[in-house]
Image: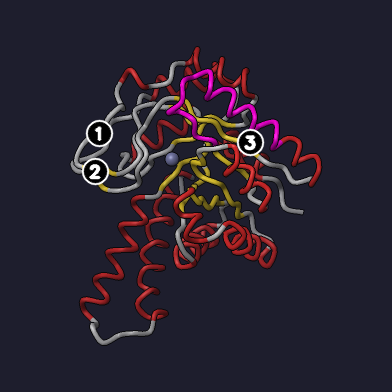
Amino acid sequence: MLKSLAKYIKEAEEKSVAIGHFNISNLEALHGIYNAAKKLNLPVIIGVSEGEEEFVGKEEAVALVKTLRERDHYPIFLNADHHYSFESVKEALDAGYDSAIIDAVKLPIKENIALTKKCVDYARELSTKTSHDIIIEGELGFIGQSSKILDKIPEGVSEASMTTPEDAKHFVEATGVDMLAPSIGNVHGMIQGGNPRLDIERIKNIRQACGVPLVLHGGSGISDEDFKNAIKAGISIIHINTEIRVAYRDAIKKFIDENPNEVAPYNFLKTGVEAVEKVVESRLKLFNNL
Ligand SMILES: [Zn+2]
């Protein structure tokens, strides 16, 4: 029997490493990510945001990940990344996702807590009914919303929007979430000229105060040193999206520019698979001290 995602997260924390979370919009990205994880024999989480899900399909995403997991008996999991309503979380969980992120940071804190708790309650109920361990992650503190290249820090992200240990403790107690994504200097997307530094001390204090594993979003563009220190301070999962999107797009564009007569998708898309694999491998090595 494969261990549950919760067990892998616990093990990662004990070993002071982080599990990589990578988003997909298609089969090529999935293959690139999976090739890299398998090569290093590491558990991996596939993320599908609401936008990505609309393109891939909920049931299709579940079928793809489940196929690899069952065929190869491999710890690959599927997460509903940044879902913004109870309905969309419920639909993903009903379709068979292993975890979901309810992102209600744009709402007033009371409403964020109420909505997050509703998702937690539903996940618990479904876990019992299906004997499938489901994890819910909550979000506290704004870090921007887009996985693309930005020319400046997104509006609304500042020191004031960072999560405090007290708020994190209250939020986790009030909602019962399994994991928390705090705002600790990270932003979604890659900022030209480099992303801001992480507040390592804050990560440590939040982890101690809230009592659940922490997730670092917006991993693209963060320095290697910050990653290492963040993991030591209590980060157990790291999200990378923009960086693999850029690698995928650039590799295919280069190949098509150089081979304008190539029309077989498996030839030009293969370069995208390889580019994703390369980025994922390097990130996983870093997150696992390899
Ligand atoms: Zn995110």
Residues under labels 2 and 3: Cα distance?
Answer: 34 Å
Q: Does the numbered disc 1 mark a residue whose Cβ is under 8 Å from ligand 1?
A: no
Disc 3 marks a residue whose amino acid type is Lys
Disc 1 marks a residue whose amino acid type is Ile
Q: Position of residue 284 (x, y in %)?
A: 46, 50
**Residue 10, disc:** 3
Q: Is residue 177 left or right of residue 35?
A: right
Helix, strand or loop for disc 3 = helix
Magenta region, main secondary structure: helix
Q: Position of residue 173 (x, y in %)?
A: 62, 18
Find disc 1 in the rendering and name its residue: 153
Q: Which residues are magenta?
A: 102-123
**Residue 150, disc:** 2
Colour style of the rendered protein structure: secondary structure
* Location of residue 253 (image quadrant): bottom left
* Location of residue 229 (image quadrant): top left
Q: Label 2 near label 1: C-beta < 8 Å? A: yes
Q: Residue at x 62, y 28 (%)?
A: 177
Q: Label 3 near label 2: C-beta < 8 Å? A: no
Instruction: Give the mark nearer the N terminus: 2 vs 3.
Output: 3
Q: Quadrant of the N terminus?
A: bottom right
Asked if 262 appears above or below 143 in the picture, the reply is: below
Instruction: Give the mark nearer the N terminus: 3 vs 1.
Output: 3
Quadrant observed for ligand 1 in the rendered image: top left
Q: Is residue 103 magenta?
A: yes
